[in-house]
Image (cartoon, coloured by chain):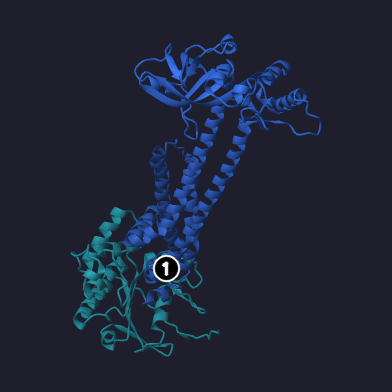
Chain colours: A blue, B cyan
Amino acid sequence: MQLSDQFDLARRSLRRHVLRTVLTMLGMIVGVASVIVMTSIGLSARHLVAVEIARLGTNLLTVQPTTRTTDALSGSIGSRALSEADGAALTNEVAKVQYAVPVVGGDARLVFGNSNWQTSVIGSSPDYLAARDWQTGAGRNFTLREVASAEKVMLVGKTVEAKLSPQQALLGSIVRVNDAPFRVIGVISPRGFSASGRDLDDVVIAPISTVKSRLIGGYFREHRDAVAYLLVKGSRSDELGDLQAEIERVLRARHRIRSGADDDFAVRDPVAALTASKSTSEALTVMLACIAGVSLLVGGISIMNIMLVSVSERTREIGVRVAVGATRTDIRKQFLAESAAIAGLGGAIGVAIGIAAPLVIGPITGSEVFIDPWVCVGALSFSIVVGLLSGLYPAFRAASLDPMDAIREQ
Amino acid sequence: MGSARVDALKGIDFSVEGGEFVAITGPSGSGKSTLLGLMGLLARPTSGELRFRGQDVANLDHVRLAKLRNAEIGFVFQSFQLLERTSALENVELPLVYADVPPTERRDRALAALERVGLGSRIDHVPVQLSGGEQQRVAIARAIINGPSVLLADEPTGALDVRTGADILAVLRDLNQRGTTVVVITHNLDIAGSIEKHLALIDGRLEFA
């Protein structure tokens, strides 16, 4: 019997019981679709982490104070543990440090003409942009001299510019920041959105001295040398561990911390933390895909069940086929073709759904969609293999029927 | 559970010559169906010799037996045994599917076979749309489509009224006159009496009637 005849036979038989066929396929459909969707989610998550790592910049460490003190006079809380002088010392004393820039931050309200906009302000040194791998798209960066004299100049992000002055460029204009007039001397090149959906262009950068004295009050106003954190950029990525040890050594010496005592600061590698969360989420994805794979096996069991029903329903048909010349192999192939067709068709529908679902849902959630074609091919092949395996026993049972008994079956 | 061995047929020694028209009768339980299974190569004897065209077929493998059934033996059953929800034409084509005959040739030969049994029309009807006589004609067309040398008919008129049964018997007689060996198994003595050679199965033994 020709293969084309086998599949024609399978097709007819499946069409004869459309509802039953579809229900039997469901396990395969759900299994294949969820394997593809799960891996798609995993790939998207991996992509988001990669984007986030790129956004953070490479070779970056942050040094944050770990102790807090309350100012006796004002009652404001902060930390003197890290200072701008620490940053300067790291830059000068550690060869592997490319930049060690002091950073403070806060919120500020910007007013320009009739527009006003609340945004976050970063106060730092001119090296901040270079440390972060950011560029000015228009205008210029501020200078060390402007930091020294606490000039009221600032760089704005694209979003800030768009909110305050949608029609014309903001460069050169005077914008009131918390009621103090600041001149816009530069616009930061657009950076888009972070993985968590934060607008990276909704930011203002100004000299750290100006920010401390004019924009954020509290602790930093009384302790002009204090910083929220130091942003350290190493010269080579493979030396981050060494760099971290060097930073700790220099700072412990500067802070006169006795050996055995705890640091009053913490060096962190934000990329390392992200990488850790990335491997966690990848492990989770693999687990979810495996669970989805189990439903493929369950789908296989339901195919076997239906094939056994089909064999007993068609006992007489099998007898007649044997009488007119079908070999046992022909009978076996007939039922194998049928179970493979159920599984293959279910798998194909599952692939279609598995591809369509992320494509539909992805744009709604605003995330990029990734589908691995090899996962689709693999899931489809696996479903066909499961279909063949679950058809084996029913097919052998059909082929081993005694034709005389089969024909006499009522 | 134990199973007792029952000898359905015992000590039978007979032969059917090419071109004969033979009736085999016997009461129910006499082993008619077993004999049919043996003659149709659907079952193998537990002991003894079974020859088809001089060749010992008792020990042939399944594939060879299937090919012999396909090419040399046609079956006609009491309850027609047509495939449900399958047109008359496709039912008749069935043996050719297993003979690897291409689809267009199958159709032509099936049409010719249906013509020969007197069923030129209604070929696209499924079995439930056909009368008993028509269904049995379809079944005979299926049995002869591959030009078998032997036609085995198991109670071919058992499910039909007397008149239709006579028509079907006439079809079988016609086929016999064109050279096909026909063996009719029946418990109907009237029919058996109208057939040239009549053997009776009694308690597993075969005798001339």
Location of residue A182 with respect to A255 vertically, above or below: above
Q: Residue furthest right?
A: A259
Quadrant for the C terminus of chain A in the image: bottom left
Quadrant for the N terminus of chain A in the image: bottom left
**B190 and A14: which one is in front?**
A14
- Name the residue rendered at 38%, 65% in the picture: B70
Q: Position of residue A10 (x, y in %)?
A: 37, 58
Q: Is residue A361 left or right of residue B48?
A: left
Would you name the residue on which mark 1 appears?
Answer: A309
**A54 and A74: which one is in front?**
A74
Q: Please rate how many residues cluster around mark 1, counting C-alpha atoms within 10 Å: few if below 14, some from 14 to 19, many from 20.
A: few
Q: Chain of mark 1?
A: A
Q: Is residue A115 left or right of residue A108?
A: left
- Name the residue rendered at 22%, 72% in the picture: B134
Q: Residue furthest top?
A: A145
- Secondary element under disc 1, as helix, strand or loop, is helix
Q: Position of residue A126 (x, y in %)?
A: 57, 15
- Name the residue rendered at 48%, 66% in the picture: B62
Location of residue A391 with respect to A192 vertically, above or below: below
**A44 and B76: which one is in front?**
A44
**A408 and A347: which one is in front?**
A347
Q: Residue furthest front?
A: A73
Q: Quadrant of residue A77?
A: top right
Q: Is residue B188 left or right of residue A244?
A: left
Q: Quadrant of residue B25?
A: bottom left
> How many marks do you count on the picture?
1
Q: Is residue B113 left or right of residue A384?
A: left
Q: Is residue B126 visible?
A: yes
Q: Position of residue B5 (x, y in %)?
A: 52, 85
Amino acid on which disc 1 is placed: Val
Q: Position of residue B14 (x, y in %)?
A: 42, 82
